Amino acid sequence: MLNVLEFFRNLPKKKCSKCGNDMFEKADCYGNLCDECDHPAR
Ligand SMILES: [Zn+2]
């Protein structure tokens, strides 16, 4: 269990390529955009 936490903790933080906000790891299809910039309704 702790190994999994360490794994994610060591991952580099992703940043939105548009607004630069920190973002959580998501599906690859989302690319480098955060929820705000990648919102389908915008
Ligand atoms: Zn963004």
Image (cartoon, grey):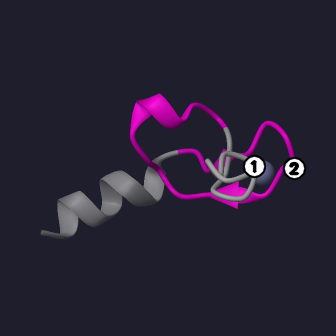
Separation of disc 2 and disc 1 at Cα?
Answer: 7 Å
User: Residue 5: percent from the left, percent from the top?
Assistant: 29, 65
Mark 1 sits near ligand 1, with its Cβ under 8 Å away: yes
Mark 2 sits near ligand 1, with its Cβ under 8 Å away: yes
Q: Residue at x 39, y 40 (%)?
A: 27
Q: Quadrant of residue 4?
A: bottom left
Which secondary structure, mark 2?
loop
Q: Which residue is mark 2?
A: 19
Q: Earlier in the sequence, mark 2 or mark 1?
A: 2
> Quick one: 41 or 22, which is closer to the camera?
41
Is 40 in the magenta? no
Our reading of the magenta stretch's main secondary structure is loop
The residue stretch that appears in magenta: 12-32
| Mark 2 Cα shell of 10 Å, populated few (<14), some (14-19), many (≥20) | few
Residue with the most extreme right position: 19
| Mark 1 Cα shell of 10 Å, populated few (<14), some (14-19), many (≥20) | some
Q: Residue at x 52, y 37 (%)?
A: 30
Task: Check whether the beta carbons of the residues at disc 2 and disc 1 lie within 8 A of each other.
Answer: yes
Residue with the most extreme left position: 1
Three-letter amino acid code at the position of disc 2: Cys
Q: Which residue is mark 1?
A: 37
User: Residue 20: percent from the left, percent from the top?
Assistant: 84, 49
**Taking 13 as reference, is 15 left or right?**
right
User: Residue 17: percent from the left, percent from the top?
Assistant: 79, 36
Which secondary structure, mark 1?
loop
